[in-house]
Image (spheres, rainbow, N blue to C red):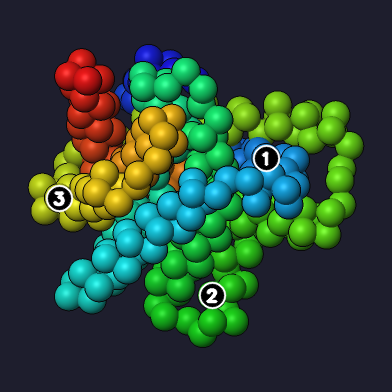
Amino acid sequence: MNIPEMLSLIIVGFLLKRMIKSRKPFSVIRFLASDVLLAFYVFSNVASKDLEYLMEIKVVFMYVFLIIGVSLVGSYLYGLRLEDKKWRAALMILSIYPNTVALGFPIASLFLEDLTPAIIYASTNTLIVLPISSFIAAHYSSGGASLKETVKRALRFPPVTANLLALVLVIGRINLPSHFLDILHKIGWWSIPLILVYFGSTINLRKFEIRKLLEVAAFRIVLPFVFVFLTLNAPKEIFWAVLVEASMPPAIVANVILAQYKLKEEESIGVTIVLTLLVILLFVILRVLL
């Protein structure tokens, strides 16, 4: 999916919201996309990998962990000074969950002919941030529940369970038939356009705050960009893949998770859409200058 297609689907969702006053159809779209199709998509992507593949990613794999760690620790420490615990949770989730596929791949293609490093980064990133984000959301939405209760709440989100099940299969070297995984992948892929439509239906800048925009931008975009730029000494295809993917705005899936657990969804949507437009502009300018 390219940038024009992505923006078109968001606009479709926004227009549908103005035509359909009830939120029920959009709630159905969110459930179908996030609880059913996304679980298929996550499972098929992870289960199709093997241990050798995971070991081959080397520096890209290492930087996924580094970027998640830098953004998570930074946003957590900053969040300790925030009185609004729900926004603290939203800030952490938005900071560690970048849009590495729907936006990351099209932007990476501006700098690269071979997107393999970007695909490796995105798939590895999803393996890690989905369960972490769901765990954070489950914990903060429950008012600080115990570890046991938080894990239970996180596992109730089907993509998390699908992710963990697929990892068990990969680690156990259990290979499912490729045609079966292909079918799941094709079905699950539809979660992306449906999530984009749902995202468009939730756009509302009435609760948009510059302060929250700057907070998310600092830990999701600026800090990862500077960290990669200053520390990564790698071939061009590796450098640009990691720099682009690490610096993407929050993923729409992150907002779906926030909606699932009722954590500042409206504020997060406004921040995400503005940062998405700013990041597109940033990398288009970089491409023109370089």
Q: Is residue 76 above or below residue 107?
A: below
Quadrant hosting residue 144: bottom left
SS of the residue at dot 3? helix
Residue named by callout 3: 214
Against 92, residue 143 (above or below) is below
Amino acid, disc 3: Leu
Left or right: 131 with respect to 19? right
Crowding at label 1, few (<14), some or many (≥20) Cα neighbours within 10 Å? some
Above or below, 182 relative to 63: above
Q: Earlier in the sequence, mark 1 or mark 3?
A: 1
Q: Nearer the viewer, residue 159 or 21?
A: 159
| Label 2 SS | helix
Provide residue 174's location: percent of width, then percent of height.
Answer: 87, 52
Pointer 2 with pointer 1, Cβ within 8 A: no
Q: Earlier in the sequence, mark 2 or mark 3?
A: 2
Q: Quadrant of residue 205?
A: top left
Looking at the rendered structure, the kind of residue marked 1 is Asn
The quarter of the picture where the C terminus appears is top left
